[in-house]
Image (cartoon, rainbow, N blue to C red):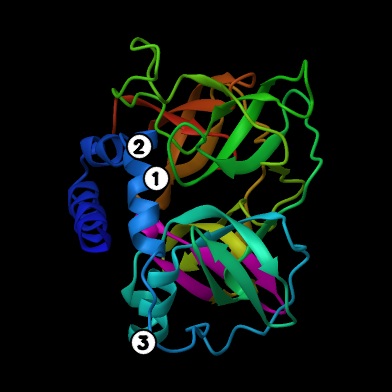
Amino acid sequence: MKLKLSLFLMSALVLSACGSSAATNEANKTTANSGATNEKAANTATPVGEAKFPFPDFPAVETTAKAGDVVLVPSFNWIMDATEKGGDQVTFIWYNQTMANPGKEMSEVKFMSNTHKVPNAYIIPIAPNGKAKKGDILLTWWQSGSGMQRAIVVDDANPSEPIVRYLDIEYDNPAKAKDGTTSIGQMDEKLKPNTFVKINAPMEPGSATAIQDGADLKHGQVIRAAGEKVFVQMFAGKVGVFDKSRCQPVPLVPEVREGDSVKAKRYGKFSAGKVAKVDAKIGRVWVKFDGSEKEEVIAFGDVMK
């Protein structure tokens, strides 16, 4: 299953690099059942050896997660692959798991039926008893699907179980939600209690950063910042560690309006364009990129002036 998922994501990378939005849409069609199957297959094997963080220049870090807390962490097989092959050779997805025994640099995490020691740098804690209000940007996972997601709160009638719109699913994804009518990129979903954490500021886990790479600004999602280093997930699930001096924070909520010139996420980089429309309720900005007549819908947190 791990091989199938890796091949699937590699195919998405090739198509996206050619400018095809179909690759992104296809990658987001994962259903709740297939997502659970992928996760189970990637976590039930028992790899040999000890997991190590594959970027030696990133400092050892502790975790705030306590035993029994929900955490977001990559599948253990992929962590072991990165230990053996190098972090830049592996594609990652962060899933929800359970903290078993936190440690100073390594923690025991329960993956399905097995428990494994994981470097804390991989672990994103989801503190219990979270409450949210309308407009908050949360870090959670696609609860009727699979995999880490940012989400904006659209209904806070029950702050412990907010209704959200996911931000990391393409707005125009043609796949349908459970009602058979609504696009998965435009559906609202109620989160379960103790399954989300508010992103309070740029450079916190889940937020975006613009990484200077020559003349380009690459898009990265912060997993952990420590000292002068930032560990990020990038285009098509690749990861890397960068100097903080190269990483520009991206506002969680962009202060933009129609006609503003912006830089927005497109094919793994920040590209120039103009704002055509903003819908703050659902956390989206319609951008017309330079050289294109088509308006593309970009999530809050992925747009900056």
| Magenta stretch secondary structure, dominant | strand
Say which residue label 3 marks: 84
Residue 235 - label: none
Q: Is residue 244 above or below residue 178?
A: below
Which residue in the structure is indicated by mark 2?
33
* Residue type beneath disc 1: Ala
Q: Residues within 10 Å of mark 3 (few under 14, many from 20)?
A: some
Q: Are marks 2 and 1 in contact (CB under 8 Å)?
A: yes
Q: In what quadrant of the picture does the N terminus appear?
A: bottom left
Name the residue: 28% across, 22% down: 174
Instruction: Describe the element under mark 2 as helix, strand or loop.
Output: helix
Residue 285 location (% of width, % of height): 52, 27
Q: Quadrant of the C terminus?
A: top right
On the image, the x and y values in percent for residue 236 come to 34, 55
Q: Is residue 304 visible?
A: no
Say whether marks 3 and 1 touch (CB < 8 Å). Answer: no
For discs 3 and 1, the disc positioned in front in the rendered view: 1
Q: In the picture, residue 130 is in which quadrant?
A: top right
Q: Residue at x 39, y 18 (%)?
A: 178
- Does residue 238 appear anywhere in the picture? yes
**Amino acid type for the residue under numbered disc 3:** Glu
Residue 136 position (above or below residue 6): above
Q: Percent x, y for residue 257?
A: 61, 24
Task: Give the residue displayed 29% in from the left and 31% down from the top.
Answer: 292
The residue pinned by badge 1 equals 36
Which range of residues does the magenta coloring cover?
224-241
Question: Could you classify mark 2 by the number of other residues whose Cα lies within 10 Å: few (under 14), some (14-19), or many (20 or more)?
Answer: few
Q: Which structural element holds mark 3?
A: helix
- Front-lying residue, 149 or 50: 50
Q: Amino acid at mark 2?
A: Asn
